[in-house]
Image (cartoon, rainbow, N blue to C red):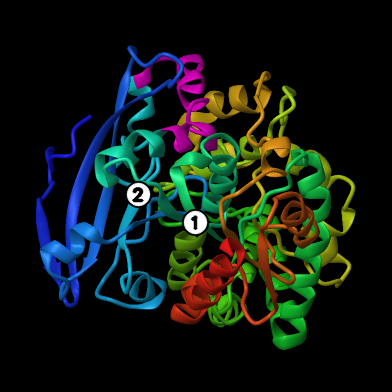
Amino acid sequence: MDTAPEGPGATATVRQPGLLLTDHHFDVPLDHKAPEGMRIRLYGREVVAADVSEAERERMPWLLYLQGGPGFGADRPVGRSGWLDRALDEYRVLLLDQRGTGRSTPATRQTLPLRGTPEQQADYLAHFRADSIVRDCELIRPRLTGGRPWTVLGQSFGGFCAVTYLSYAPEGLDTVLITGGLPGLGIGADEVYRAAYPRMERKTLAHYDRYPGDADTVRRVVRHLAAHDEVLPEGTRLTPEAFQQLGILLGTGDGSHRLHHLLENPFVETASGPRLADAFAEQVAAVLSRAGSPLYALLHESIYAQDGRPTAWSAHRVRDAFPRFDAVRSAAEDRPVLLTGETVHPWMLDTHAALRPLRRTAELLAERTGWGPLYAPERLARNTVPVAAAIYHDDLYVDTAHALATARAIRGLRTWVTDEFEHDGVRAGGRRVMDRLLALARDAAV
């Protein structure tokens, strides 16, 4: 394992206002059960307050930040702000790009063919779930902390990883902070999506209550897409079903307002009649594209797979039980078009430009059996690590009832259930959210 800042584009240490940033690189096994086999390189960015002396810095405890996803690299800081500002009061922070994301041996339509056939690509990606991420962390930790346990802050999917960490390597943890990321311990993908579609409906109707004109705008766009072929700038075909996925915005604090602004002016008159405006199409592409995060689609359902059975396009199958989500029919009958989000469908392998080359790989992952457990309920019931979790009252992405059941199942876990924030509360709430979680964790340690 190498912590030297080597490789293309790598730098040793740079300064930003209030921050000192240092690159770290780590070589880890692809398969932790076969440590002598293929290795991949991970990247993490150390962040410390610029006004802390080197001697003080060496004495500070570490905080590991695990990003949401799956498939997204860690936050890229620009100055000292938000939750990071509060964390730097007492921690050295490691912003880890989880395997396959950011600068950690990225897995994309461009790089995955290097792994061989679609079958070989699927076998490769089967090692990119939370259990492998936790084992990566446990290899990294001694090199940075000298063997001391560290605090983990897990946002969304990062919180799922933190619960896996508590299950299988609690000796590496000093404290765990979770924001919008308590998974259902024994909940499979079908149960996740049966609970998700009613939330999506509530969020959509709440948006139309706030911005009534948007209901008609969405219907007009759906009718247009049902009759015309529209292609977004990066090559994605915008079908009515793909357009519905803009509902993913409704899970963040400002998402309803952002969606409203996006829908302000979707059409432009052309020589051949009304078409989607280029500016509108560009904004839609920025939300829907999976060019930079294909793992979000390829591995999304696998994060719920634990019972050995295939996920088999769970969200798509479960959607059949909710006919109100038929966008074309709703528009034709002048009913509200319900939006979706946080779901992956097989038709995306045709519509989404970045996923088309990975079609067979995605199909093989959906068919894959033998997924092992990600959590150990018996061990969690004996937990001794201080844990605090923010649970958002009507979280679009993580079912509140499932999260509360898990909170009760982890010994000593302290919860903060709030409707003040949406799923991105740790970013929107910044220092205030971190203060609350740290205080709860310290109470849990008493």
Q: Position of residue 248 (x, y in %)?
A: 62, 62
Above or below residue 321? Residue 133 is above
Quadrant into which the N terminus falls: top left
Mark 2 surroundings within 10 Å by alpha-carbon count, few (fewer than 14), some (14 through 19), many (20 or more): many
Q: Position of residue 62 (x, y in %)?
A: 33, 56
Residue on which disc 1 sits: 175
What separation in Å lies between label 2 and label 1 (alpha carbons)? 17 Å
Q: Is residue 67 visible?
A: yes
281 or 95: nearer the viewer: 95
Residue 182 quadrant: bottom right
Crowding around mark 1 (Cα neighbors within 10 Å: few <14, some 14 to 19, many 20+) is many
Quarter of the image containing the C terminus?
bottom right
Q: Residue at 72% x, 64% y: name it.
A: 339
Residue type beneath disc 2: Leu
Question: Identity of the amino acid at label 1?
Answer: Thr
**Is residue 217 or residue 363 the one in the foreground?**
363
**Residue at the farthest front position:** 446
Indicate the secondary structure of the residue bearing disc 2.
strand
Residue at 11% across, 63% down: 54
Image-based side of 275 in relation to 375, left or right:
left
> Which residue appears at 43% of the width and 50% of the height?
72
Residue tagged by mark 2?
96
On the rendered structure, is 424 left or right of 283?
A: right
Q: Quadrant of residue 332?
A: bottom right
Q: Which residues are magenta?
A: 115-135
Q: Is residue 40 magenta?
A: no
